[in-house]
Image (tube, rainbow, N blue to C red):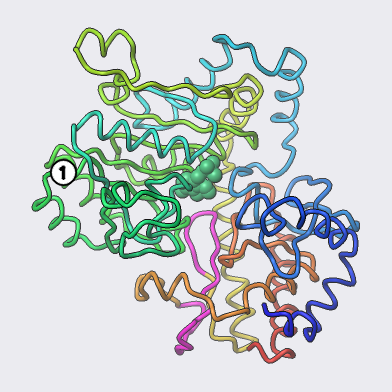
Amino acid sequence: MGDAVLSDSKIVAAYRERTRGSERLAGEAKDLFPSGVTHDSRDLQPYGIYVTRAEGSHKWDVDGNEYIDYFGGHGALLLGHNHPKVLAAIHEALDHGTHFGANHALEIRWAQWVQQLIPSAQRVRFTSSGTEATLMAVRLARAWTGKSKIVRFKGHFHGWNDHMSSGFRSHFDGSPTAGVLRALAEKVVLLPPGDVDAVRNVLTTDNEIASVMLEPTGSVFSRVPVTPDFLTVLRDLTAQHGIVLIFDEVVTGFRVSPGGAQAFYGITPDVTTLAKVLAGGLPGAAVVGRKEILDALDFDVTKREGREKIQHQGTFNANPVSAAAGIAALEIVASTNACERANTSATMLRAKLNEVLEVEEVPWAAYGTFSAFHIFTNPKNRKVTPSTFDPLSHDFVELTTNPPGVVDKLRLAMLINGVDIAGFPGGTLSAAHTEEDILNTAGAFREALKMLKREGEL
Ligand SMILES: Cc1ncc(COP(=O)(O)O)c(C=O)c1O
């Protein structure tokens, strides 16, 4: 939003009015952090809310405003904020110490849960973040195949390491983003999502492909969905060519089903990256997969086989507090219908949001799969019937582009009405979201749309 919009908008004025405390903190933050934020997705004009506490599906800001939360710890909180069993496990672990610089029993229990739930997890290596896990996944693929290139899909997000930066929001031609070496970007082959012919063509003509990597429910947790058939074809083609298939299940793992997308679809990749739900709301991630591929990290096997071992350190890998939270969370995921509850709530929310769009005659649509919801803001102003919107009939650029300015105003209007959504726009649901939350969210959405209409945005 430009300065003129910021000063003229009634939405912005109403937001400022109720978030004076957040505004004060944002004033301090702007001289500390680039753009005043610690994660790109927290960038909101004129400033984002500052939160003091959270519980279940709700959170409260420094001004005492309450919000229904659809950020859900960036997808980590399938069980909602402060699940009592996860909290108790964290407290107990804390009392024993936060870091032993040694092996400990909790890392074993944690990995056993991973192995029990995730079909591809013959071996497990913990890292501290999903970005580290995807970095290790491609290194493992290269070490295993002796080949250099990675096939990725435009719009799919895999964290911010150098291999993953082109082709998410920009640089769809594969050119390097700022600060990334051209030589490295050239080793990433970016293809249109869902394009079987393009994959087949690359795998048959380029001998240097080490792996094909994707988010198995599509870019940004189904914002640009891929079909299960696409996954089947990828599995067949990669197996045929001896190429490592990597599922990035950082979001979908333990969320779309206890065993992630791979268990849901019955398609087992060679390597999987995991994070978020894995660590119960604390930092933690893992790369898991076929034993012979992860053997590249094994001192004895590599020595015996005359292979070079991949080095891997990481101060906080499998730290006992994250391990304790992860064990508690995975136990709940395995033994309850938490995934199903979140999925069912999301289906209901998408339907309610579409009802609102139809009543308000706004040609947008709420869509998504599993526990995700996305709002299509119709940048090309097409005729759209919200309840029958099919994202597969639109390309990824259209699905990921929003008309200028409207998303920040939508987010502010939702915040004014007590709901925090992410900036795609959309969000994730947890098992803690209730029917009341969903109905209140639909009410807030209706109010927000009316506010946008009054400002001529719709
Ligand atoms: C699919 C996917 N992969 C990788 C990452 C990176 O994980 P992290 O933020 O833990 O580095 C994310 C983060 O949102 C993600 O959604």
Confirm whether residue 251 shows in the render: no
At horizontal 78% and vertical 45% (from top left) the residue drawn is 55
Residue placed most toward the observer, 304 or 91: 304
At horizontal 56% and vertical 30% (from top left) the residue drawn is 330
* Magenta-drawn segment: 367-388
Figure check: 81 above or below 311: below
| Residue 221 coordinates in the image, percent (x, y) | 47, 55
Drawn side of residue 301 relative to residue 429, left or right: left
| Residue 201 coordinates in the image, percent (x, y) | 12, 58
Confirm whether residue 415 shows in the render: yes
Q: Residue furthest left?
A: 205
Residue placed most toward the observer, 9 or 421: 9
Residue placed most toward the observer, 323 or 169: 169
Q: Is residue 387 magenta?
A: yes
Residue placed most toward the observer, 307 or 218: 307
Respond yes or no on whether mark 1 lies under 8 Å from ligand 1.
no
Drawn side of residue 283 relative to residue 127, left or right: right
Tell me the quarter of the picture where residue 196 sits: bottom left
Tell me the quarter of the picture where residue 414 sits: bottom right
